Image: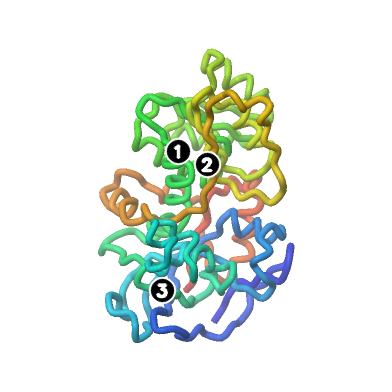
Amino acid sequence: MKALVYHGPGKKALEDRPMPEIRDAGDAIVKVSKTTICGTDLHILKGDVPSCEPGRILGHEGVGIIEKVGPGVTTMKPGDHVLISCITSCGKCDSCRKGMYSHCATGGWILGNRIDGTQAEYVRIPHAETSLYLIPQGMDEEAVVMLSDILPTGFECGVMNGKIKPGDTVAIVGAGPIGLAALLTAQFYAPSEIIMIDLDDNRLSVSKKFGATATVNSKNEDAAKRVMDMTEGRGVDVAIEAVGVPATFHLCEEIVAAGGTIANVGVHGVKVDLHLEKLWDRNITITTRLVDTVTTPMLLKTVRSKKIDPKSLITHRFTIDTILDAYETFGKAADTKALKVVIAAK
């Protein structure tokens, strides 16, 4: 089968790899129909994720058809149409019993990281019954693949951890796919304002279409001053960091209001300074999280009922044969205007 393989920082290749096989009783082999590229894949390629070793097939998002199942799988069968969760969960360990699937003792974020992932024609999914979701008949695969990672990540790590309430003023720093996913799902809670901050005018324009009440280009102006002016010096109730670099976290520190929350979503590969000399008396909360995907069933229902349309995040489409072009396009988003790319595995 064809697969996209990581060969160390800055190195990747499309290769022929052996078909995956059932290893454990709870495994399923899924024939991938659609996959995508995540910002975390770019972090891997930068060398920011040392747990991902050279030789690994990348990718942790996808939809497909079950090809075969292990003897321990009783609620799913070959031919079932499934969503592949970016998080693998056994459903039994202490972390899973707390709903913290991202820290599963034998799972968590392992696909495309510690085991071979979804940017291939077939993938092995451990703990299939608790790591795959049956797709209701008639749902659009391209919309559903957005539920593998970015929708639950933006919602759980940004919106839920940020404790957004009706009437809140929210700033989302970073208008990439994760920031836009947070923007879409923040509107479940009716905040009064959602301010999107980014360096890219195209992404800010898209943000307005998706429901942002205001945008700030931090390349062209002092974003912190602008936000403080917009909020009459108070700052925002919730600041969501959706990039993963020191400058964007520092911006969140500058604009959060007294009693507010900074919800970190971004993957940070280098140290970030926490300015407690400015924040110690501000009654703020700082949250961190790796997505647990506990909200995936609910998000499936909202997409099925057309309350949100994650397919609108897709800007480019490729096949597995052109996946290197997909990476080039996604990696140069400022030039290509890429948000999410979809890759057809067949």
Residue 309 percent location from the top left of the image: 37, 47
Q: Nearer the viewer, mark 2 or mark 3?
A: 2
Q: Is residue 165 placed above or below 332 in the rendered structure? A: above
Q: Nearer the viewer, mark 2 or mark 1?
A: 2
Say which label, 1 or 3, has the lower sequence index: 3
The reply to whether callout 2 and callout 1 are in contact (CB within 8 Å) is no
Q: Which residue is mark 3?
A: 127
Amino acid at dot 3 = His
Neighbour tally class for label 2: few under 14, some 14-19, many 20 plus, Cα within 10 Å: some
State the image quarter where residue 30 is shown.
bottom left
Residue 321 percent location from the top left of the image: 57, 71
Q: Secondary structure at mark 1?
A: helix
Q: Which residue is mark 1?
A: 183
Residue at point 46%, 37% (across, down): 162
C-alpha gap between disc 2 and disc 3: 28 Å
C-alpha gap between disc 1 and disc 3: 31 Å
Say which label, 2 or 3, has the lower sequence index: 3
Amino acid at dot 2 = Thr
Q: Which label was assigned to residue 232?
A: none
Neighbour tally class for label 1: few under 14, some 14-19, many 20 plus, Cα within 10 Å: many
Amino acid at dot 1 = Leu
Q: How many marks?
A: 3
Neighbour tally class for label 3: few under 14, some 14-19, many 20 plus, Cα within 10 Å: many
Q: Which residue is mark 2?
A: 287
Q: Is residue 83 placed above or below 72 in the rendered structure? A: above
